[in-house]
Amino acid sequence: MTSTLIRNAFVVNEGTTEIKDVLIENGIISQIGESIAGENHTVIDGTGKYLIPGLIDDQVHFREPGLTHKADIESESRAAVAGGITSFMEMPNTNPQSLTQELLEKKFARAAQVSAANYSFFMGASNDNLEEVLKTDPKTVAAVKIFMGSSTGNMLVDNREVLEQIFSTSKMLIAVHCEDEETILENTENFKALYGEDVPIQMHPLIRSDEACYKSSSMAIELAKKHGTRLHVFHLSTEMEMDLFDNTIPLKDKMITAEACVHHLWFDDRDYAEKGTFIKWNPAVKTKEDKEAVLQAVLDDRIDVIATDHAPHTLLEKQNTYFNAPSGGPLVQHALVALLELHHQGKISLQKIVEKTSHAPAICFQVEKRGFIREGYWADLVLVDIQDPWSVDKSNILYKCGWSPFEGQEFQSKVSRTWVNGNLVYDQGKLNNDIKGSRLLFNR
């Protein structure tokens, strides 16, 4: 492996932005300084550009195995590194679902063969696999995932006794999707009584309502507090839920942490008129007030992490009626540039973006030697030009599904280069398909 010297970039890291040189040797950041000697190194001129730690996306659905007509680990990891995401943690609701240690390890083995980014996978919990859940190795697996709301097959955990058992016995971090199924079903029947099967997409945030979110997330927090469980709550979407979370405790000491997703910071219910089912997510995109409240909670540290919940479906699947169009959309390629657009709008600082997308996931999940630009850490790095406008269209979309909810959007910023473990995997629009990421390890 050759050494690489990135010169004269604005290094955004741990709350500061300073012009620095960064030397990469054998996959590791070996030196950070103001003027590092350049002999025998591949030199990259970072003048005028911003060097940030690679994003760690703690929630993606790459659809492999079993749903690879929508996406797969190879295609979506390439889109991720093109978007500045160097590590991902993938969800268990594939086909088959990751409900046994054997099935979980098959996903790790597949990622080792094809993933352009570093990777980990969640162990799935169901109403009847507690024994398998308890076998999960906290040093080599991201977390246990519980769907306390709608999911597929056997992955909706709606048995209070089972939840008590998982929360009281698991030594793993437990990550949860929180929407109350009973509330959603009742709302669905009420809207079907009004509209029949032709419910407008605008009703989605009223069916998957604030109350459904709050009822479930508050129960998860109650269980975590009762049993002293390490809990991480995914994709919060409502103003109502923000008061459930604390910003008075240092992140490293928090037992209960929270995540927001890019789409809940960007879209609101006014966008359904134009975007329709292309912005149908669970939890739903809600009101402008909810969007602003979630962003404020990100800024004041009640919410700790920003992720994508990247969940692609085919164009044909999404171009359907409300009940028949699946929820979810592709985001990994455009998450960072969307956040940088919010920075251009004066809504969030570069330092806060880096904190929430790189530092905080590394701290929350105790990821080993990633998430920061530090000597001795793996060289997962992204060089960004924040003044290089471009527009999203089908010709530059890398997702296997071939579409994006951001189509037609002009972004002011562009990812220039991405390094994974010191390897230049994405270089000014070109992917090096020979480079593979590594399995994430955790300091637990």
Image: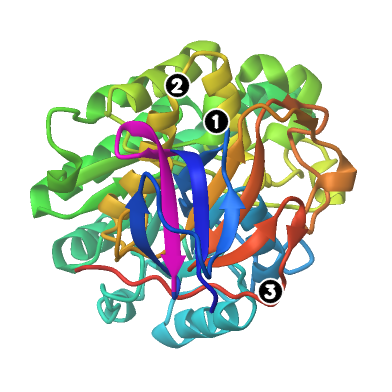
Calculate the distance from the C-alpha at mark 1 to the C-alpha at mark 3: 32 Å
Dot 1, how many residues are within 10 Å of its Cα: few (below 14), some (14-19), or many (20+)? many
Q: Which residue is drawn at 40% across and 17% down?
A: 293
Above or below — where is 250 with respect to 138? above
Calculate the distance from the C-alpha at mark 2 to the C-alpha at mark 1: 8 Å
Q: Which residue type carries mark 2?
A: Ile
Which element is circle 1 on?
A: helix
Check residue 339 in the rendering and tell me which mark sits there, or answer none. 1
Query: Percent x, y for residue 16?
Result: 32, 32
Which one is in front in this view, the residue at disc 1 or the one at disc 3? 1
* First in residue order: circle 3 vs circle 2: 3
Q: Which residue is drawn at 47% across and 63% down?
A: 155
What residue would you read off at disc 3?
A: 66
* First in residue order: circle 2 vs circle 1: 1
Which element is circle 2 on?
A: loop
Which element is circle 3 on?
A: loop
Tell whether label 1 touches label 2 (CB within 8 Å). yes
Residue nearer the viewer, 125 or 297:
297
Calculate the distance from the C-alpha at mark 3 to the C-alpha at mark 2: 38 Å
Q: Is residue 285 visible?
A: no
Dot 3, how many residues are within 10 Å of its Cα: few (below 14), some (14-19), or many (20+)? some
The answer to if 48 sits in the magenta stretch is no
Query: Percent x, y for residue 122?
Result: 42, 66
Check residue 348 in the rendering and tell me which mark sits there, or answer none. 2
